[in-house]
Each structure stands twice: as structure tokens, then as C-alpha cells.
Image: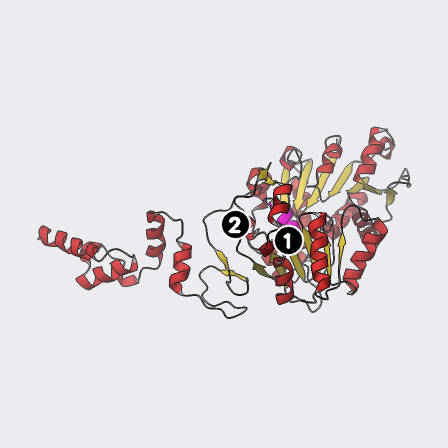
Amino acid sequence: MDFQHEFRDNISLSFRKNKRVIAQAHPGFGKTIVFCDIARRAIAKGNIVCIAVHRVELLEQTFKQLVSFGISPSIIAPGKHPMPGAQVYLSMVETFCRRMDKGLVDKLNINFFILDESHIGNYHKLIKQLDCYVLGFTGTPKSTGTPELKDYYDDIVCGIGVNELIQVGRLVPAKTFSVKHDFSHVKKKGKDFDDAALRQEFRKPKLHHGAVDLYMRHAKGKKALCYCVSVDHSNQTVLQLRDLGIKAAHVDGTTDPETRARLFQWLKDGTLEVLSNVGIATVGTDIPEVEVIIKNFATMSLVKDCQVNGRGARAHEGKEDFTIIDMGRNYLRHGAFGEEIDWKHIFNHPSDAFRKESNKKSKRECEECGMLMKFTTQTCPNCGDMVSKQTIEKEMLRGCTSEEVREYRMKSLPVHLRIPVELMTYEDLKSYAHHLCYSPRWVGVMMGLRNKRK
């Protein structure tokens, strides 16, 4: 596609001046296709390429894509030994690092590395040992560990954003439902919420039952991935769903690979309706059939929030949109799905990937159904619940200073009142005072000052 070709060409241009480049492409962009094409072009020029991935599922996915490009990679994985003289190697990152430490890969003469999902922390021990051209691919160019990506890479190239991907049919828009809940008191640990404190918070009835309630109201029977705070939290959520007749199961890091693969296949073919997990169905999970993302957690990490959203956004036949159930009000910290993110800025200023809730109110939840909508919308597009203009304004101005209140009201000032106060008639002054919620006495004071000047 044109946007993929342009992305590939921009990466090539960056390599004219840089040795290490990070390429950002949102989940659903087709980055595997792009880096396989780049690998094909690189070997055509005589380079020896190694593509490193961090999960078995990604190894299999990348292998199939390389074969579709006419490339037969030599696999570097447990129980598999690379074939010297190959043009392309495909490796698990941990395996490659172990063999590198033993000097077992030196003779392969690799001079170009492509790292998939390069924000993952376990790439650090690999990249710091490489003295060749390196291309890192990720949807979220903010490291999950330390150092930061900007400490390893010289430049970043970004693909088109979410809204453009929706326009070209790669992604679908989202409908988001949430609940009003205050997380400001939850204890922090490092740059995110403390796990123990978060587990305790999600035991509160509104959150403990809320995700299941919203799923049953707005997405019952649709294929869903649910992301929970802990294994116990996930299992409890699954039990609630099963009690309501929903076919649900749980998967986590201790689930054996065969069972894990079977559960994901069951979700894909409809045997399961909801697959709940803890830290598993994130990067690399590609199930376009998923129509619901249940964020049964709260996080201050922009990377985690974006990666989770991306699991439900992929386009699929008959899929016009997808549903996000955001129990942690994560949209307040990171924006709603579709709000553009300046990834170049995040790459250069990684601390900005961790945002705190602000007083800026651009979205609000419907009091009746929980749907997220523009803050000033009076009628919910989902359930038709209506809120008065006065109620919206009161909530909008909660916590604002007097100057912020005045600035907000001045934006909606009628055109005929946008003149100097000195030129206003008595009726104009009354309307002006009413619009800005000034005391009626203000009109009398202004008229008095005007008479004195005469």
C-alpha cells in the first residue's frame, strides 16, 4: 500500500545519515510486511540480516510472512542451530543473546538487525552489543525498561496515525464506555500504580462487578479480550461471566504454551466469547475478530494503554467499530482512542509518556450508560440520556480559578457583546453580566462610573 511504501522509503532516507533507526507504526499498520520487504531489499544488496522477536507467536508469524516474500530464513531458537551462509536469520532475542555470550553467532557475519517490538526491555542487552545497522520496529516508541530508546537510536521515523489508518481501512473506530471513579488516592510505585494498591482498589463493588455489567449491557456475546490487574482478579472476572452464561476463560504467564495457543484459537473461532488475561495478550496478539477490549485495570503507562487498545482496533470483515470498556478511566491520562499522539516528542522526551490526570475536560461519561462522549454533548448518542447545559457547565468549571471561569465564558460570548464595556448600553451590560454570571450589582457599579465620567 502507498502509506507502507512511503514509510519504507522514509526509513531508507534516515539510514543515509544514521546507523540506528526506530520505526513507529501503530498496531494494524502492517509493520511485519514492511520490515520483511526491507529485509528482502537488504539481502538483494548483499547484506546478511537477522530479525529478532521476543515471543514464539511472533516467530511463527514472521516466518510465514518472510516465506510469502520468497525468503527462507534460518531459525535461531531453542533446539535449532543456525545455518552458516544464510541470507536471513530469524531469532528469539533471549536465545540470540545467550549464543552471543558464548561466541556462537560471530561467524554468521550479520550486518543488519531488525528488532520487532523494540520497546520491550529484554532487547537492551542485545542492542548494546551490536556494532552494525539496527532497525527497531514498535507501535509505542517508549522503552518498558531503562535506558530509554533515544539512548540507543539516532532517529525515529513515524508512520501514519490512527485516524488515517481508519480512513484507509486498516483500523476501525472505537466506542468507549467507562465509570466515574477517583483513582487519585491510589498509591504509586515508580511511574505507575502500586500493584497491591490497585488490586485492593478493584475489589470495590463498582469496579469488581462493573466490567462484567458493562460488557453484558453493551457487548454481550461479542468476542472480547479482558485485561486484569492480577491472576486472582482475572479468575474472579471469568467466574462472574460464566455465572451469566458467557463462555469465558483465563490465561496468564504460567499457562503452558499448548493450552495458551488453544485458548486463543477458541476465541478466534467463537468457542470462547471472552478471554481474560494478565500481561499476555499485548504486543503481537493479532486477532482481528476481537470486537471488545475490556481494560479492567488502571495504568499511568501510555505504552500499555496504547498496546491494549490496538488489540481490538484491527479491521475485519463486517466489523464497523469496536468497543472499549475502560474501568480504570485510562482515557483521562492518555486520551481516548483516536486522539493523535506525538510519538516523535515521546521518543525525545520519554518522561512525557507518563501523564497525570489534569483538570482539562474534553470527554465525559454518560450518567446512564457510561458511554464516553464530548464533554459538552447534552444528549448521549448511545442511550439518549439528556443533561442540561447548566449541569455540564457546572461540572466543566469545577475546580477552575475565577480567571479560567471567565476565559471559558468569554469564548461563548454573543457577537454583539464583544465590544468595549464603555460602549455597551444598559441592556447590553445586563446581558453581559448575566452571561459571565456577575452579580446584578456589577451593572449598577458600571453605570455609576459612567455617570461620574460625564
Provide the residue designation for mark 2.
Answer: 182
C-alpha distance separating marks 1 and 2:
15 Å
Nearer to me, 347 or 158: 347
Q: Is residue 111 above or below residue 212?
A: above
Q: In the rendered view, does 338 fall on the left or right side of 120? A: left
Instruction: State the residue at coordinates (61%, 53%).
Output: 160
**Over which residues does the magenta segment extend?**
302-309
Nearer to me, 278 or 443: 278
In the rendered view, how is the structure colored? secondary structure
Q: Residues within 10 Å of mark 1 (few under 14, many from 20)?
A: many
* Residue 53 is inside the magenta segment: no
Q: Amino acid at mark 1?
A: Asn
Instruction: State the residue at coordinates (84%, 48%).
Output: 256
Instruction: State the residue at coordinates (20%, 64%).
Output: 427
The x and y percentages for residue 90 are 83, 43
Provide the residue designation for mark 1.
Answer: 296
